Amino acid sequence: MRNVRLSLNNRLRSWIMAARPRTLSLSITPVAVGTALASTAEGRVRWPAVVAALLGSMFIQLGTNLHNDAVDSERGGDGPDRIGPPRVTASGLLSITLVKGGAAACFAMAALMGFYLVFVGGWPILVLGVLSILSGWAYTGGPLPVAYTPLGELFVVAFFGLGAVCGTYWLCTANLGSAPIETGLAMGLLAGAVLLVNNYRDAEADARVGRRTLAIAAGPGVTIWIYSAMMLFPFALLPMIGLALPRGHVWPALIALPMALALVRRFFREPRGPSFNQILVQTVQMQFLFGLLLCLGLAL
C-alpha cells in the first residue's frame, strides 16, 4: 500500500512538473485586468463569463505546456545541455503518449468553456477561441512549430495579452476601445518577456535542434535591448490607458517599475546560464505584480 501511495505521489509530482503551474499567472492576470477595466470603464461585469474565460485561458496554457513537454522530447529538443528545469517526458517520468493525451484533454476543456463564451460574446469570441487553441497546439506542433521560429514572443503578446484582455472586456461589455487594446499590449509585452528569457537562456540548446527563436535570430546583444523594451514599454503606456478611462487610477502600477529596472539590469550584466532560471521566475512575478497593481488602482 505504501508503495502504491509513493507511486501515485511521484506521478502527481510529474504531472505538476509538466504543467508548470508557477507560470499560470500569465493566463490568469490578463483576464483579471480585462475584468477590472470593464468594471471601471463601463460599470459592467458578467461574472459567469469571466469565470469561464479564466478557466478556458488556464486550460489553454496547461495544454500548451504539456504539449510542449511531449513534442520537444519527441523532436530531441530537451537534451543533456538543457539549462532550464527538467522535462518529464525527456526524463522518462511520463510517456510522450500520456502527456499528449493530457494536453488534448486540457484543450478539450478549454473548448467546452468556449461553447458558453461564444453564446455570450458571439462570433468574435468564436474566432478568438479557435485561434487560441490552435496557437497552443501549433506552438510546438505541426510542420512549422511557432516555437522553432522568431514569432513565439509575438504569439504570446497576441494571445496572453491582447486576446485575453480584449476578449474578457468584450465578454463583459460587448464593446472595445483604446483602453483594453493598450492594456492588452502592456500585459502581452510582459508575458512575451518571459518567453524571451526562456529562449535566451536555452539559445545554444535550441540552435542544436534547428530552432530559430527570436533570441537566436537577433543575437545576444539585440536580445538584451528587446527584453528591456518589453519590460519598460508597458509603463510608457500607462498615461494613455489612464486618459482613456473615465475613473480609476493606473499610477499604482508604477510601483512595479523598480523591479522591472532591476531585472533589466540583471539581464544586461549576468552571463547566460542557470541564473536565468531565477530571472525567468522573477519576470513571471513582474507580470503578475504589474497586473495586480493595475487592478487595485482601477478599483480605487
Image (cartoon, rainbow, N blue to C red):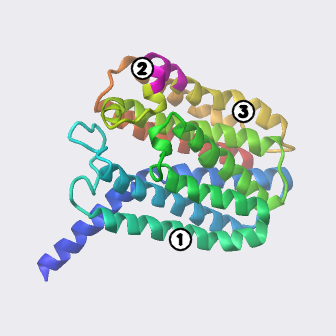
Q: Which residue is mark 3?
A: 238
Q: Does residue 21 appear to the left or right of 60 in the view shown?
A: left
* Image: 161 above or below 266: below
Q: Kindly identify which residue carries mark 1.
A: 108
Going by the numbered disc 3, the residue's amino acid type is: Leu
Seen in the picture, residue 8 relative to 20 is either above or below; the reply is below
How far across and how far down the image is residue 195, in percent?
Answer: 47, 39
Query: Which one is in front, 234 or 181?
Result: 181
Q: Position of residue 187 (x, y in %)?
A: 62, 41
Residue 300 in sight in this render? no
Q: On the image, which quarter does residue 233 sit in?
A: top right
Callout 1, which amino acid? Ala
Q: Main secondary structure of the magenta part?
A: helix
Rendered residue at 84%/39% (across/down): 244
Q: Position of residue 143 (x, y in %)?
A: 47, 49
Q: Earlier in the sequence, mark 3 or mark 2?
A: 2
Q: Nearer the viewer, residue 23 or 81?
A: 81
Q: Amino acid at mark 2?
A: Pro
Mark 3, mark 1: which one is toward the viewer? Answer: 1
Please state the extent of the stretch shown in magenta in the rendering.
217-226
Picture layout, residue 105 above or below residue 125: below
